[in-house]
Image: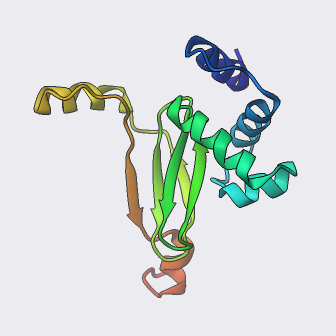
Amino acid sequence: MSELEHALTVLQNQGIKKTTQRLNILDYLIHHRIHPSADIVAKSLKMNLTTVYNTLEILISSKLVYVLDNNQDGRKHYDYFGHPHYHVLCRNCGKIVDGSNIDLHSFPNLAHEASNFLIEQTSLEFIGLCEDCQKLLGLTENN
């Protein structure tokens, strides 16, 4: 099953209708792992910005899309989150990278055991300096 088919099944199971806008935005986010802002999605897909925001809100509520607040540019960035993964954000240039070498599946159970909360969503972000910014700032020996 492709990522898009998986996402459409999740929407269907939640009673959310498959629309052209949802399909196009999901497809874009799945295939363009650049963590775009809503403006970039709207321009890339030649869609109305309000439509993009409204559609993203539905996809966020379905837990298929995750919002990253990028302090570097002050905008929200969006990521397809059909399968949990973590993010690494550069505090200097705003670069965002997906990570998948940590198994996040045990985190909800650990958090539940520690807090007795009903865990509904998991996210993990690491913030630091990317390799390019480390070089730019003279923090590595490989300048």
Left or right of residue 53, residue 74 in this image: left
The residue nearer to you, when weighing 50 against 111, is 50
- Identify the residue shown where x is 48% and y is 87%: 137
Left or right of residue 125, residue 48 in this image: right
Describe the colour scheme in one phrase: rainbow
- Identify the residue shown where x is 53% and y is 28%: 62
The residue nearer to you, when weighing 136 against 40, is 40
* Image label count: 0
**42 in relation to 118, above or below:** below
Judge whether residue 142 can be spotted in this image.
no
Q: Could you say where residue 76 lies in the image, as x and y percent from the top left?
A: 55, 59
Judge whether residue 40 can be spotted in this image.
yes
The residue nearer to you, when weighing 132 against 96, is 96
Name the outermost residue toward the right.
Answer: 46
- Identify the residue shown where x is 57% and y is 75%: 132
Q: Could you say where residue 114 lies in the image, as x and y percent from the top left?
A: 12, 32
**71 in relation to 88, above or below:** below
- Identify the residue shown where x is 42% and y is 83%: 139
Q: In which quarter of the image is the C terminus?
A: bottom right
Q: Could you say where residue 110 lies in the image, as x and y percent from the top left?
A: 20, 29
Q: Quadrant of the N terminus?
A: top right
Q: Could you say where residue 47 lies in the image, as x and y percent from the top left?
A: 83, 49
Left or right of residue 116, residue 57 in this image: right
